[in-house]
Amino acid sequence: MSNLPFQIDELILKFLNKTITPNEHFVLKEWINSSPANKEIFENLTNKEWVATELDKMYEFEKDAGWETIAASLKHAKRIAGKKNRKWFQMVAAVVLFALSIGFWFYKTPNKVIPDQNLSQKERFGAEIMPPEINQAILTLSNGKKIIVQNDPKKELIIHAAALTLKTNDGNIIYKDRINSKKEVLAQNTLAVPKGSKPLQLLLADGTMTWINAGSSLTFPSEFIGKERKVSMTGEVFFKVAKNKHMPFKVNANGTETEALGTQFNINAYADQPNTKITLVEGSIRVEKRVSKLLIGSLIVKPNQQVIAEKELTLIKEANIEETTAWRDGQFYFEGADIKVVMNQISKWYDLDVAYRGTINSSFVMKISKDVPLSELLKIMEMTDLVRFKLEGKKIIVMSYTKP
């Protein structure tokens, strides 16, 4: 059925064939003048170059779609169009009939575009985006000085900064205090790993090893003194705490404090996530939640358990440790994760922004190496027929998808 009112498609063909009656011509002119869009449609259909271009586009689109019946008629129309002695209106007829047959009349006009979710993957993904190949970070010293730390796997890099000797090798950063004074010992430093970097390992002065994920930071002293060892963090950090029963190790993250003596645990406290997750791998920890110094919750956590901190603390007795720590092993691992959780990880790894079109409530189960081009990851997710993606520069557009 025609999408144009008053059978305007037929009137346009009659106009081109010079068989239109005065009354029909009046109706056509009224329709043309009723809107800029109608005027543009008419001008396009009476432009030989535009019609020829659209005919080629439609033929290619039809061929990819595999509509054999339309293919036969369209091929016939193209043969007719190639003969100079045929009337021009026959080419327009082919354009009009083909457009109407697949319901894309308005979609084919210059002001309309193919819906993004129906474009080919090549058109939607554009230039390939590769995973990060190096470790990089910014070290901010207590005096405000910033130092760029970048590790070339082929070289050993040593940086001297204030009281710190930073030595990077194989993705590790080891620092030592060079000036034995109380002022320098108490200095607080922050190591921030940006989006688009591989996770970075930092060995603290007490022997505690930390893994700092992309889009995360860790604030730590040059040396630990007193009765406790305290650090603070944002984003996601894995801790393998050196044992010292006389100095508990404490981590402040997004209003929660995690205390340990000697243990291994992961803290996910990204600002763009709805909650903070503390997952224990080995040993024992205590997790406390405070608001304005007021204690509102305290839990003792055992191995393979997880605490979810929101307004209150919730204990998950059987956590998926492999999923939680997969980022340390260079993997994306999702076990029924919400699309926004998935895209948060992807955006930090490839250093991209994410935008959503429509309501998307899909969840994903997936395990794949992080050392893959972005397009390969997106193609795997699209195989579910739940979502479609489009890359626009440094932004991923996430769209819901329903099979036609």
Image (cartoon, grey):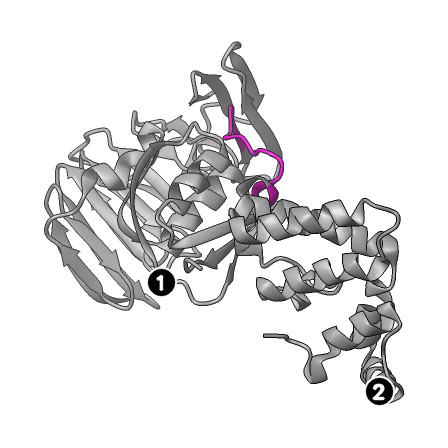
Above or below, comparing residue 400 to residue 140 in the picture: below
Q: State which region is magenta.
A: 123-137
Above or below, comparing residue 324 to residue 137 in the picture: below
Which three-letter amino acid code belongs to the residue tagged 2?
Glu
Give the percent coordinates (x, y) of residue 250: 28, 44
Q: Locate residue 122 relative to residue 311 in the image: left or right.
A: right
Task: Label 1: state its secondary structure.
Answer: loop
Mark 2 crowdedness (10 Å alpha carbons): few <14, some 14-19, many ≥20: few
Q: What secondary structure is the stretch in magenta mostly built from?
A: loop
Of residues 373 and 46, the one drawn nearer to the viewer in this rendering = 46
Label 1, label 2: how far apart the Cα atoms are: 46 Å
Of residues 277 and 109, the one drawn nearer to the viewer in this rendering = 109
Q: Residue at x 41, y 46 (%)?
A: 382
Quadrant holding the C terminus: bottom left
Q: Which mark is residue 361?
A: 1
On the image, numbered disc 2 is attached to which residue?
30
Specify the quadrant of the image occupied by residue 295. bottom left
